[in-house]
Amino acid sequence: MKKIRSCKMLTAVLAAIMMIPLLSACGSGGGNGNQGSKSDNAAQGDNTGSKDNTGATGDPGNGQVKELSLFIDAPWYPVKEWKGPVADKITEKTGVKLKVTVATDDKQLPLMIASGDLPDLVFTYSNVGRLSDSKLSYPWNELIGKYAPDFKIDKTRIAIHTMDDGNFYTVRNSFATQEEMAQNKYSIGSDGNPGIAVREDILKELGNPPIKSLDDFVKVLGMVKKKYPDMVPLIMDKDWLEQYFLQQFGTGVLLDGWYEQDGKVDYSIRQPKMLEFFKFMNSLYRNGYILAENFALANDQIDDQYATNGKAFAHSHTVATADTDNIKIKSSGSGAFTFKMLPSALSKDAKIVSAGLGFAGTFITKKNKDPETSIQFLQYLASDEGKKLTMFGVEGEHWTWNSEGHPDLKYNPSDADFVNGNGIKWWYLYNDGVTEGMLSYVPGLQKTQALMETKAITVYKPQIGLIQTQPDSEEKTIKTKIDEMVKNEKVKIYLAESEEEAVANYNSMVKNAENMGLQKLVDWANATYEKKKDLFK
């Protein structure tokens, strides 16, 4: 996402994703299977398909290739055209090529919906609810019944995507259950998880002080500030300001999400550990370890430049930060220093609650000129062969299958230029969290170790992700206003001149949310949660 989605999110947002929900984002979620054997895939209940049941739409050898238009509702998307070895191989297998348009901004798709000017397919993460409408999109269940009866989707994925009208209109990618992830030790998650990288050379000059806790980290930031007064102790990506530290405090939620306690849900800012998190962030600012301007960076490349140009000691972004920064430093020809990742858990309370239902989904719109070809195209992407092709690249050229149950990649998945240039991953119009999670398993990479540590502290609660406000609803209006207020007010807490001022600003933020209808929103959320959580029993 931007970088994380390139991978710089899911997202964030999502983180978003992520723990998000972003962390989101992007990702988002802020995100979240397939191991190669049919027996494993059958045990998961997902449709991985046999090679003669992949949903291929015909024999492209006859020269007849069908073109479908695709709108990608993500202005940051790194792949803009249907080209490269992965796209070519998908066309070879399905007889389908895509005419791709990437959004120019987040307003474009809503305007297209309003005007009725929609393409054959839409890939979106932020407008899933809006497009899950029989007036706008074909129900997948109806198309599967008519044109792809062998396209089997497991009950959990159907349940979480079924709307009030009894239909499901998409299945998001990047989703996996706790059980699926537990059964696949080589599926360790995606770049859309937070991390912090630090300069190895400077640590050595400081005497290699241990960093095994948040207190240790803060002490080292103080040492850096004292010995290197012209260096920024900690630079943060604009979309990943707080995710790593929220994780360390064990809040289990991002700042616009829901958390569960004793069977009830509440809005993020009222999580019991949230005030301690805000006080910690404020202390980083008051001690001069982070910059005030970090909260107003113009784009998500500036933090990278601080890190790779030697202007910062620590770089907060994702679990891939050290690997990607080191690649950039090496390619620049300097090679003067390297980064290493901090542990994913720097406190006994460290925890991630993955409430994600996946990242983004593909919709077959009512403007689609060939719904039959479209659903069969998605069936191929949902097959074992299709998911591996999309996520890892062309077998033999980009990877081979290891008998232990994971791909041996012939490239570094943190090398964004190679991945994007070959169209690897980004055509995941249907995929899952297990397959995506295996893309990150590369022995020797720092990201691999960071994700293994992250997986160990992750709890999956997709039932929380089902608390979704509907477009144009009163709950949507309330939550949007509260989310926007929190986005603005949190910076006042971070940049307070004293801890007392930070606490007062936090209390004021919570009070503002309550005055805007927070309790009414929470009551609705709990009623929704009671109805939805039984889907996972």
Image: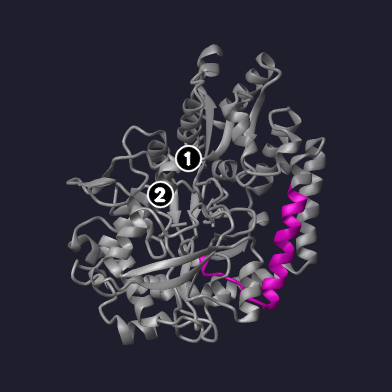
Q: Which mark is residue 342?
A: none
- At horizontal 32% and vertical 51% (from top left) the residue drawn is 393
Q: What's the magenta region?
A: 464-490
Quarter of the C terminus within the rendering: bottom left
User: Could you tell me the amino acid type at mark 1?
Assistant: Val
CB-based contact (under 8 Å), mark 1 and mark 2: yes
Q: For mark 2, what is the residue?
A: 189
Is 384 left, or right, of 211 in this rendering? Answer: left
Evaluate whether residue 537 shows in this view. no
Q: How is the image coloured?
A: one colour
Residue 417 appears at what percent x and percent y? Answer: 45, 42
- At horizontal 71% and vertical 72% (from top left) the residue drawn is 477
Q: Is residue 407 above or below residue 152?
A: above
Evaluate whether residue 385 shows in this view. yes
Residue 19 appears at what percent x and percent y? Answer: 52, 52
User: Could you tell me the amino acid type at mark 2?
Assistant: Gly
Q: Secondary structure at mark 2?
A: loop
Q: Quadrant of residue 58?
A: bottom left
- At horizontal 51% and vertical 34% (from top left) the residue drawn is 346
Distance between mark 1 and mark 2 Cα atoms? 10 Å
Q: Is residue 161 above or below residue 401?
A: below
Is 501 left, or right, of 198 in this rendering? Answer: right
Residue closer to the observer: 386 or 60: 60
Residue closer to the observer: 405 or 356: 405
Residue closer to the observer: 414 or 529: 414
Name the N-terminal-most of marks 1 and 2.
2
Residue 529 appears at what percent x and percent y? Answer: 54, 72
Q: Is residue 207 above or below residue 487?
A: above
Q: Is residue 483 magenta?
A: yes
Q: For mark 1, what is the residue?
A: 319
- At horizontal 18% and vertical 63% (from top left) the residue drawn is 39
Q: Secondary structure at mark 1?
A: loop
